[in-house]
Amino acid sequence: MTKLHKFLFADLDDTLFQSREKCAPGADLVPTAFLKDGSPISYSTAAQRDFLAFAQQGMTVIPATARNIDAYRRVKLDFSSYAVLDYGGIVLAPGGAVDPAWLARMQVAMQAALPGLQALAALIDAWAVRTGFGGRARLIEDCATPFYLVVKDPDKVAARLAPIEHEVVQPWLDAIDGGRDYFIHRNGNNLAILPNALNKSHAVAYVTELLRAEHGDIITFGIGDSRSDARFMAACDYAIVPRASQLAALTVAAL
């Protein structure tokens, strides 16, 4: 019987670790991701650590994360294969080098999307000035390439992002293209507006083809916590959904 190579594409934040505030009191926590000054920002639970160890016994785990290269390198977990970063904007090859072919493809798509992101950022910032909202739209870049906008409430009051989404972002999307070229990702205190060309699912499909070219037939698994992870998970042979996650509430818990 042929034994197929198995690969798990894994979201990181809120899947394999999370902020201390999201952990249960008294949980057995280990610092897992760190700020630039070396202080811990995210922690893994005993169950998350055991799950990762279990997965790595029989599968190669490939991160699929919104983190940029710098933030990814401050994650203290052992990965040895590819990595999908920046919501799919960057692919790292085994060894950590940026995949040049994928980056070139994404740079073309992101330059086409940039004027729209800049226009929306100006609208969000103008709304923030009028209303006294303390946050601003930030254009997230990596490898000298702009990828998407993100807005956070400075006081971490996620409900304050709702008016920005409904009064500014959604009307702009409806007015320019009915949502064909950009989409909204909302999860907690994170409101992101991304070009449709930027999606983990595209990068996961690209890496999957590289793996098939190397190994022949393979089996792929996907695990993620948020609605935005669903597309890359659907591109895999099997999908795993953490309990009490945004995606679980939309799928399993809704049944």
Image (tube, rainbow, N blue to C red):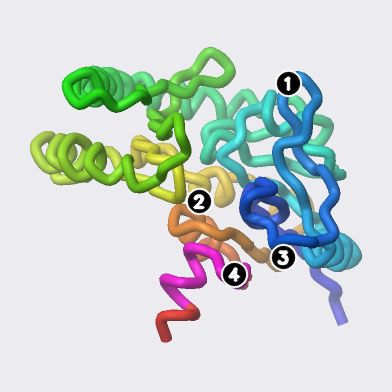
Query: Which residues make up the magenta segment?
Result: 242-251
State yes or no: residue 244 in magenta.
yes
Q: Which residue is mark 4?
A: 241
Q: Which residue is mark 3?
A: 217
* Secondary structure category for the residue under label 2: helix
Residue 180 lies, with reference to residue 150, above or below; the image says below
Q: Which residue is mark 2?
A: 201
> Looking at the image, which is closer to me, 196 or 158?
158
* Secondary structure category for the residue under label 3: loop
Spatial CA distance of label 4 from label 3 is 24 Å
Spatial CA distance of label 2 from label 4 is 16 Å
Spatial CA distance of label 1 from label 4 is 30 Å
- The earlier-in-sequence mark between 4 and 3 is 3
**Marks 1 and 4 in Cβ contact (< 8 Å):** no
Label 1 Cα crowd, 10 Å radius (few <14 / some 14-19 / many 20+): few
Q: Is residue 138 left or right of residue 223?
A: left
> Looking at the image, which is closer to me, 21 or 231?
21
Spatial CA distance of label 1 from label 2 is 29 Å
Label 3 Cα crowd, 10 Å radius (few <14 / some 14-19 / many 20+): some
Spatial CA distance of label 3 from label 2 is 19 Å
Q: Is residue 239 in view from this perspective?
A: no
* Nearer mark to the viewer, of 1 and 4: 1
Q: Which residue is mark 1?
A: 36
The C terminus - image quarter: bottom left
